[in-house]
Amino acid sequence: MMKKVAVLGGTGYTGMELLRLLWFHPEVELSFISSESRQGEALAEVHPHFAGVSSELVFSNSNPEEVPTDMEAVFCALPHGSSAGIVKDLLERGFRVIDLSADFRLRESSLYPEWYGQDHPYPSLLQDAVYGLPEVNRACIKEADLIANPGCYPTSVLLALLPLAREGILPEKGLVVDAKSGVSGAGRAPRQAFHFPECQESFKAYRLASHQHTPEMEQELSDNLGKEVSLIFTPHLIPINRGILSTVYLPMEKNLKEEDIRKLYEDFYSDEEFVKLLGRDLFPETRWVRGSNYCYLNLRSDSRTGTLIIVSAIDNLIKGAAGQAIQNMNLMLGLREGVGLQQIAPLP
Amino acid sequence: MMKKVAVLGGTGYTGMELLRLLWFHPEVELSFISSESRQGEALAEVHPHFAGVSSELVFSNSNPEEVPTDMEAVFCALPHGSSAGIVKDLLERGFRVIDLSADFRLRESSLYPEWYGQDHPYPSLLQDAVYGLPEVNRACIKEADLIANPGCYPTSVLLALLPLAREGILPEKGLVVDAKSGVSGAGRAPRQAFHFPECQESFKAYRLASHQHTPEMEQELSDNLGKEVSLIFTPHLIPINRGILSTVYLPMEKNLKEEDIRKLYEDFYSDEEFVKLLGRDLFPETRWVRGSNYCYLNLRSDSRTGTLIIVSAIDNLIKGAAGQAIQNMNLMLGLREGVGLQQIAPLP
Amino acid sequence: MMKKVAVLGGTGYTGMELLRLLWFHPEVELSFISSESRQGEALAEVHPHFAGVSSELVFSNSNPEEVPTDMEAVFCALPHGSSAGIVKDLLERGFRVIDLSADFRLRESSLYPEWYGQDHPYPSLLQDAVYGLPEVNRACIKEADLIANPGCYPTSVLLALLPLAREGILPEKGLVVDAKSGVSGAGRAPRQAFHFPECQESFKAYRLASHQHTPEMEQELSDNLGKEVSLIFTPHLIPINRGILSTVYLPMEKNLKEEDIRKLYEDFYSDEEFVKLLGRDLFPETRWVRGSNYCYLNLRSDSRTGTLIIVSAIDNLIKGAAGQAIQNMNLMLGLREGVGLQQIAPLP
Amino acid sequence: MMKKVAVLGGTGYTGMELLRLLWFHPEVELSFISSESRQGEALAEVHPHFAGVSSELVFSNSNPEEVPTDMEAVFCALPHGSSAGIVKDLLERGFRVIDLSADFRLRESSLYPEWYGQDHPYPSLLQDAVYGLPEVNRACIKEADLIANPGCYPTSVLLALLPLAREGILPEKGLVVDAKSGVSGAGRAPRQAFHFPECQESFKAYRLASHQHTPEMEQELSDNLGKEVSLIFTPHLIPINRGILSTVYLPMEKNLKEEDIRKLYEDFYSDEEFVKLLGRDLFPETRWVRGSNYCYLNLRSDSRTGTLIIVSAIDNLIKGAAGQAIQNMNLMLGLREGVGLQQIAPLP
């Protein structure tokens, strides 16, 4: 029997992708959808790409009391800040929740005012949230009632660095993360900076040394290394719709050979369905993972400068958001982890 | 049991999409693939977006003698001109063939030198080919041994006009077809005109009054109307990867009301899975059908000028090529027509 | 001595281009600039691309009383609707005005409610405005106090059709104008439809049979032909910043030969600095005129269907707006018509 | 009297920009142009964006014997490798040469086989070449007979780092240069990797730890610091036509304050026309310098990690190639350094 699930917040880019992926998921039934702005309208009215799908779903509002009690998982794709309260209510009503906002990603409540500009409204909940990166947290995710679905940049960077952290050879200092994202990462609400002619034929860095995903990466790396890690993180805006490419630089001991590091990565990810280390001379392009739940990695050790460079590519809306959320749901509901997520990139 | 199929020509854009769609098709097994340029290499070596798919397929050459005899259908995605001879050999060896080139689309062999610049090598085969537009030729397709898969522009234009032709109210003269295509329509071989900086931030018309898809549209419209139809066709190049939007203009009798024409289209396409007339004020955008087998239509009757305008959008590589070919295959093999083709656009 | 000029509305795309072109104009001094939203800020603060220019200009508000009396011309690049009142005040204060809004383009006040959705506030002024297309109105422009600077689409279409209208061989009916514009044509204010991910990798038609530039084209063509002309106009959105390509279709008498029509165009534009008929087989691409005040034309007569096709390309912000406004100013102030406008496209 | 100049290699992107900028340069006359592939054709035939310019220039071949002796400077925009021999001949014939290839940028001939894959054919000439970065080499450039015009990436990186090198506070190790370039940087010859659909909607890193611009940056930084500098350099491909953004990371002593570094940069560049440090919170976007000769810089010191981040933006074809070459020519010919180069970006 199909398991019923709900999506709160189905008009933003992350919500749209959740709706699409869940609609075609062979083992769940998308049964309840909400939207503040388009409440009362039918799915295909709001999203014309659904016009060929004979759906009778209508957007409700996002009031937790409206969510039918037989939902086996509830996805929250609501704006940062406004998600926390709704998640709390959903948990109190007994739902298992996958929250795609940033509201439960940091365990240390004091980081919220520093990086998000406001206090966390329910700091006591932070300890209950499981950080939803299946490649390192699979066991906890299966049992969790609240998943903090990772940020898009952190997903790309953590998958690039976790093998080193787990092996204990990640340097605690000197990490440089230079990351680049497509514009869908900025959300769907129109703003001057993301107006088409302000992005097209341009490229920029933004939020230097102050992006809110920084402490999320440091938290997870520190946890996995067992020591306090700090890094410098610079995000950039690419004039494309989808895709994140992260280029990570680490000072490396010269006696550590590239082939040994490759071996470490291959072993670490050998059983992972969605993380692939490419052949030695093939570096990831974002288009190869566009529309898919894959993360593609490659690395190079430069002995001239003693630097290890790791390049990682994901689709920010799938492995960086909706796809990873469904991967988490699959684990929570006891389904095969990759079910509903096998799509590969429709190139070009 | 899975039905085995082959794809000849798996490195161009059309071939790549055939491989992707067939790989995930639930009722066929992609069993044989060929490529002249990458013969001997494995699927994921040639196409890195397949890296996550545990395929052991290796590209063979395209010699018809290499195609295993248990293939229930063979797709030819070879260049125009070089396809005809291979198709002939495949037919002689008893295969059912879906040819994605232009080599069998025109029934009148005299049109080849005029529009394609060379004589047809096997004119006697032209009468055996079935024009593979399921929405009008479904019965013949089921029985065919050779499908001439329609051109991308013709698919978008014919779906826009066939209801009028079948109803007998398509004007024989005065049709203007202004069509626009993404760059993947030009194929994958690098050429100056499609070098990134020559296309980006630009737009142009090309092959005015001389594009080789013109007689294909005239042939099918004439057949369906039962009178000789002529039209003027201007293709344009959009700096996007995928998508065709055709804007078609017809002089219309003023007593024909827009609501009657809408009714005609709704009825004509009421049982069609892949053709959708949008709501009155919603005109198609190519992104809504990107990555899908859908054709979205809308129309407007302008009483000021006595003009009917029809706008049609498809993904040139799917409904305009690989998807339609698979739709034809499904019919030929007695499968459900839409199986393997339900994907909708991964927006944005 | 440099002639002083003012620009009201210097933060939109048209205003920005006026500021740039006037800054480098060798015979005028940009002396006064205004902006409602950025009043009090310096030019380079508001527009970082001016950072290398040692300007001390500061944005004032757009109150006509603030405009210094020694301005020899005032450009109004204010939103449609809000321009009319300010223009009226400027005229009353004795300024010569070039209005880049649509507020004075239609001579017939009754067309405003039909096409712009509201009554014109000062209909008596409509007869005083000179339609600022130098290629046909040069003499009147020189003497004018109020220039209605043409719309971007009308500029591209009128330059394509005026030789036929003036020669008396433009058909009164059956004209089809299929036009395509970059996104800057929609202005600088962020809106959902022009948010980067909603435009990128997509293409669409909009405002079918109802775009407000239709009566402007019909007015000018009728005037020049001496008979009432009607046309059907469909604008489309190209995912590029700048550029308009118009493809115009006309039924043509079969005895009219393409070489004769070419001769007519060559003669008509032989003395024009900014309109160029390209060689017979070279059709315009928008990139060739990007950043320039040129209009590139070409045409093809299709004897199969009795259709003449004309293709026209301009930069919507230059020949379609700011450049044309400066061309008008040059005429008004007795300067050489092309001064300050010689830039050609910075390809690619 | 106008000074005559020649351009050898006028069909690539760098050559096209030289032709455009020199055509409008008020103090030089573009008198001789060459192209191997389009020899014998007129300027506007080869480059349609010149159609409005009444030029009678015709492309010659690139044989140095054809260059008229009254040329006061000769620009070589020929492919790397094939330039050296022609430059040698030009020098022997007494011309002053500005070479835009890489053939004379490295003083140490042993670096050519390592980074360019072949021996330098005329190593003795390397010592005669002056590295043409006016901001640090102005005096030598004025007297030079042979200018090695800097690479595009090195220009963006050196302008970002030279103030620190000259001040002696650039660290010798630990520099990370993460740079991103538009596709025109790859040249105009069509290749698979730069075919439109292979770049659009994608982003990638390339030539990790092996790009040939690395030793050029190290050479100049070492020279200016007086110590051997090494750096790790990763170039990336942005799907835009023009623009380079370099993000540079340096370990910084914690007692060095951001305001002091800003002061250093402001002082260092206070007399420079083309290098601008933006206001503290305004980080460069490539569009702001597109079509201009400017380099925009900004920096941030992150005390959390002890890192200084510098962001630099240029137009790769202007300050990164043709514009800088003309800036060098201006110096060589005793003209005002910025003449002919005042254009600012035509936004958007």
Image: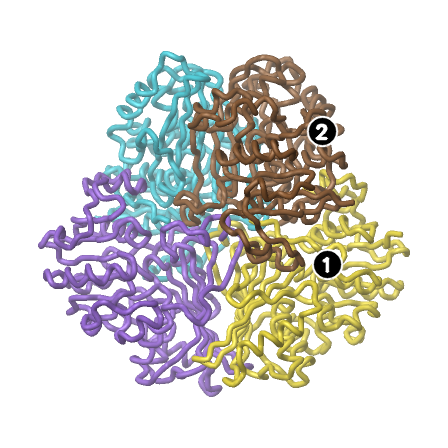
Chain colours: A brown, B yellow, C purple, D cyan
Dot 2: what SS? helix
Compared to residue A217, the image places residue D56 above or below, namely below
Mark 2 belongs to which amino acid? Lys
Specify the quadrant of the image occupied by residue A13: top right
| Residue C231 image offset from top left, x and y in percent | 41, 77
Asked whether the residues under the numbered discs 2 and 1 touch, taking CB atoms below 8 Å apart as contact, a structural biologist would say: no
Between marks 2 and 1 in the image, the one whose residue lies nearer the viewer? 2
Q: Residues within 10 Å of mark 2 (few under 14, many from 20)?
A: many
| Residue A142: numbered disc | 2
Q: Nearer the viewer, residue C132 or A62?
A: A62
Asked if residue D311 is positioned above or below residue A256 in the image, the reply reads below
Compared to residue A132, the image places residue B12 above or below, namely: below
Residue at 73% x, 58% y is B77
Q: Which residue is mark 1?
A: B78
Q: Amino acid at mark 1?
A: Leu
On the image, the x and y values in percent for residue A319 come to 63, 37
Q: Is residue C3 visible?
A: no
Q: Residue at x 28, y 41 (%)?
A: C46
- Left or right, D126 with respect to A155, comes to left
Task: Pick the residue in front: C49 or A18.
Answer: A18
Q: Position of residue C91 (x, y in %)?
A: 14, 63
Residue drawn at the location 54% of the way across and 59% of the way down: B285
Q: Position of residue B13 (x, y in %)?
A: 66, 53
Badge 2 sits on which subunit? Answer: A
